[in-house]
Image: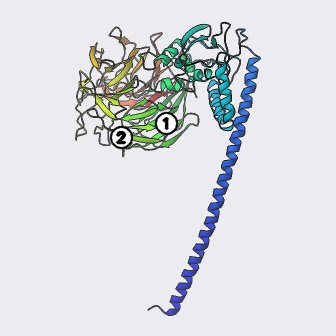
Amino acid sequence: MISPMFQEAEERVRALVREEVDGLRREFDVLRRECEQFTQECRRELQEQRRWLTDALARVEDRLLQGAQHHPGQHGRQQQRPLNATTSDASADRGQPQSFPASSSSSSSAGNVKLPASSVRRSLKTRDATHHQQHQQHQHQETANTDVDADEDGIVPSTAVVTLNVGGSLFSTLASTLRRVPDSFFDIMLSGRHPVARDEAGHIFIDRNSVHFPVILDWLRDPGSPQALPFNDAEFLHELEYYGLADAVLGDWTTSEPDLTAVTGGVYAIGSESPNERYDMDRNIWYPVADLLQPRTDCKYTWFNNRLYAIGGRDRQRVYAAVERFDPRKNNWVPVPDMHHARRSVACAILHGQLYVIGGLDHDGRCLAFAERYDPDTRTWEELPPLQQCAGPVACVVVRGRLYVFGGSEMLADPRSYVPVNAVEMYDEEHRTWVARAPMPQPRYELHAAVVRTEVVIVGGLASSSTASALSRTDIYSTETDTWRSGRDMRLQRFSVACCDTIGNMVYVAGGSNPVALETVERYDLDTDTWTILPNMSQHRHFFSAAVFQGRLLTVGGMTYRRDRRSQRVGASMPVTTVEAYDPATNKWYTLAPLNNARAHGVCVTASSF
């Protein structure tokens, strides 16, 4: 039995503890209020600094405008240059490695104002927003005055016809066509917010090379029309960036082969269990870059929003739902919210500014029909309805703003068995459902797809779960008529090819298995329905990676087989460091600097210049 003395002591201790806790709570409340007050003061200080910087930037731009008015262009024109009509060479002159000849492309004429157009557009938007908040009444008065002097200040009604002088060539179109993309060069030019340059005939003058302007103008007239846009032309992409149209034009475009991303710029060898590397064109060497936070294989890599995304994958213990994003400027990987479903060997597509992830396999190799998409603005994954018939490693492409999925396998309990399907599904964004389209003539698993204009070329793959069922058949799907037609067969049966992409509307198929590694390369011409055998690669390779870079086909790493020197029998495969480039202009392969580390089951990604 506890004595009264101990009970009294216990009560005193409890009272002291309660008093101490209450004191700590009061101190915490005081600190919390002080922190909130300090945070509010910091926010006010930050807002003041932002306003000061915005005003300073506006003053700098006004000085640049005044300087541009006193320094006319190189062609002796005395008219005032538009603020955004600054030009630069498409790419700096660089010494190309001897084994990789430089491509010939025209350069834009140089202007006098060296402020980058993209920076000017961003600063103009910031300044306009700030002025609108600070001087709303004065801004309305300026707009009213501008409307009165439309001819002088450049405001044109949306139904009016506008004639542009682009580097000496005349182009006529509607003002509404030019202003189709908000905050683009043309939208700002015709808004009346800033002066524009005019030639002697009174046409708006743009001091740019006009070579690619007809293609850009055709896209503005009808973004959904079937066009063969030169995505592999660095000069074309540079013009898109200058006019502020890169996101709009490239946002609905993805490469035909899910494992490749073909823009222009640096070349990255990513993935597998080897360290990541980047290719230096100037010195013809590979140097290391940051590795994934979670190393894995069977991971999907996609270039999206100027970042490289690593999606899903597996290691020897498990399959991942994890997603990481690589920033080339900072050379680091950062985590992105996980997908809803862990999986590997997925297909990806970029559509309307969102990243779609489709199909794949689970840890045991069972085929999955899950679909979800990632919104970079909200940093969230939205789960979509599952595929109706396609599952597993499917092929997916985007054509004219629509997402198509081809083939795959039935979902079976036994992960070792695959039953290829001939299903084709299209995603209906409005009704959030998958719509069945005309089935493929041949069921396929591990197939490959390439887009040529509005048609999809399907090649390779397996007709059953046996590697002996490799296909040489070619089928062409018309997205306009929802019909199929047969093309000529490839010269060789093959599956797991490393490249099925287009260069100038030609479909290239390289390497793969049948069932051993192949060194052969073929090219398909859809217009003539012919396959052409190209020069072989230097090695038999499969499980290598490939990409299109500066109009050439790059092949990186992979697996080749060992051959006994005496018996010449084929043994186990081994990874290689080989890097080669095929130039369609010369019909030759060029050997580039080898990787620092042998690599297989990775990807080769070409990314925008940073």
Q: Position of residue 601 (x, y in %)?
A: 40, 32
- Can you tell which mark lies on residue 343? 2
List x then y, in percent, for residue 409: 26, 32
Amino acid carrying mark 2 in the image: Arg
**Residue 98 in view:** yes
Q: Amino acid at mark 1?
A: Pro
User: Compared to 123, does 3 lie above or below?
Assistant: below
Q: In the image, is 113 to the left or to the right of 178?
A: right
The structure residue drawn at horizontal position 65% and vertical position 6%, both measured from the top left corner, is 201
The image quarter in which residue 349 lies: top left
Q: Earlier in the sequence, mark 2 or mark 1?
A: 1
Q: Which quarter of the rendered picture does the N terminus lie within?
A: bottom left
Judge by depth and name the residue closer to the eye, 566 or 152: 152
* Between marks 2 and 1 in the image, the one whose residue lies nearer the viewer: 2
Q: Which mark is residue 275?
A: 1
Specify whether residue 230 is in view: no
User: Is disc 2 in contact with disc 1, using a CB cutoff of under 8 Å?
Assistant: no
Q: What mark, if any, has residue 503 been given in the picture?
A: none
Give the SS element for disc 2. Answer: loop
| Quadrant of residue 571 within the rendered picture | top left
Residue 521: image x %, image y %? Answer: 37, 17
Along the line of sight, the residue nearer the viewer: 245 or 606? 245
Q: Nearer the viewer, residue 546 or 75?
A: 75
Question: Does 281 appear above or below 343?
Answer: above
How many residues crowd around disc 1 within 10 Å: few (fewer than 14), some, or many (20 or more)? Answer: some
Residue drawn at 66 percent across, 48 percent down: 43
Q: Which residue is more in the foreground, 382 or 559?
A: 382
Q: Residues within 10 Å of mark 2 (few under 14, many from 20)?
A: many
Q: Specify how the rendered protein is coloured.
A: rainbow
Quarter of the picture holding the C terminus:
top right
